[in-house]
Image (cartoon, rainbow, N blue to C red):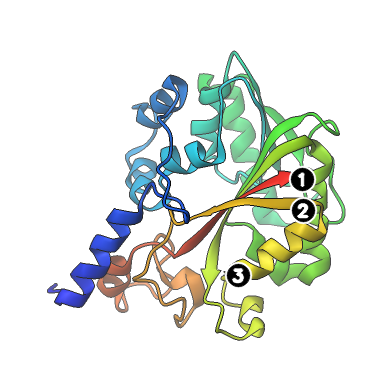
Amino acid sequence: MKFGLKTLLAASIVTAIAGCSATGSSSSSSSAELTSAVADNARSDKNRARDQYRRPAQTLEFFGLKPNMTVVEIAPGGGWYSEILAPAVKGQGTFYAAHFPADSKVGYYQRSLAGFKQKVAEDTRFSEVKITEFAPVTHSNIAPAGSADMVLTFRNVHNWYMRGGEESTLSAFKAFNKALKTGGILGVVEHRLPEHRADEDQKSSGYMKQSYVIEVAKKAGFELVEASEINANPLDSANHPKGVWTLPPRLALGEEKAEQYKAIGESDRMTLKFKKL
C-alpha cells in the first residue's frame, strides 16, 4: 500500500512526539524494574506488538511510577498493563487490580474476571496482586481509603460515560479520589474526541473530549498536573463508521478497508496526570 507525503509526514510527527509532554519536557529514565517488566519475554508477542501504540514505559514514567508505590489499576481486563505494573512494584510496593465485580450478571465481565484470576493463580509475575472490585456507583472500594499513591485507568472513561453518563463517570473519579492519599496521582489515558465535535458524539463513538475529562476530574477533587502527547496519533480523525472500534486492535469492519485502518494505527489518546487535592 502506497502512502503520500502528507501521510508520511504525519507518521513522523507521531514518532517525534512520543515520550514528550504537552509542555515539551522529556520523560525521565525508566526505573530498572519498569524497564525489566516491559522487556520481559514472558509478555506475548501480541501484547508486545501494541507497545508502539500504547507506549507503556513512557506513559508510566510520565505518571511517575516508582517501584515502592501502592498502585491501583482500574478495570484491568485481560491484564495488558497489569503484566507490566505487577512486576514493576513486586517486592517493594503493592498492586491492586480493581476488576469487574464478582456479583456482576454480565457474562463478559464474569469471563474476564475468571481469566484474570487464573493469571494471578498461575503466573508468578502476578503472585502479589490483590484483586478488588470496581463498578461506577455500586462498587467503589478499590483499595483501603487514603492508601494509594497512584490510581491508573486506561481507555475506560468512555465506557462509564456511555453506560451511565456523567453520574457514572463522576462516581468513578470519586472512587479514585477516595482510594488515594492526599497528593496522590491519578493517571488517565483515554480515546480523544476533537474539541470542535458535538458533545453528543461522546455517547456512542468511544471517544471523549479532553476538556470534559478534566472537568469531571476537577469535580471529583483533582487538579490537573500536566497533559502529555505521548499517546497522540494525528492520523486518527476520530470519525469512523463504527467509532473507535473501527481501528486496531478491534477492526470492527473486519477485512473492509482493514489495511487503511491498520495504517492509521490505534486511536489518538489523551494522557492526563492529576493530583488529589
**Could you tell me if the residues under marks 3 and 2 are in contact, i.e. CB atoms within 8 Å?**
no
Question: Residue 258: image x %, image y %?
Answer: 30, 72
Residue 81 locus on image (x, y percent) = 52, 40
Q: Amino acid at mark 3?
A: Met
Amino acid at dot 2 = Phe
Residue pictured at 25% horizontal, 64% vertical = 11
Compared to residue 68, the image places residue 248 above or below, namely below
In the displayed structure image, the side of residue 29 where residue 225 appears, left or right = right
- Pick whichever of labels 3 and 1 is earlier in the sequence: 1
- CA gap, disc 3 and disc 2: 15 Å
Instruction: Confirm whether residue 136 shows in the render.
Output: no
Badge number at residue 173? 2
**Residue to which mark 1 is pinned:** 176
| Few, some or many residues within 10 Å of mark 2 (<14, 14–19, 20+) | many
Q: Nearer the viewer, residue 63 or 259?
A: 63
Residue type, numbered disc 1: Phe
Verify CB contact (< 8 Å) between mark 1 and mark 2: yes
Most extreme residue toward the left, as rendered? 2
Q: Tag count in the figure?
A: 3
* Quarter of the rendering occupied by the N terminus: bottom left
Residue tagged 3:
208
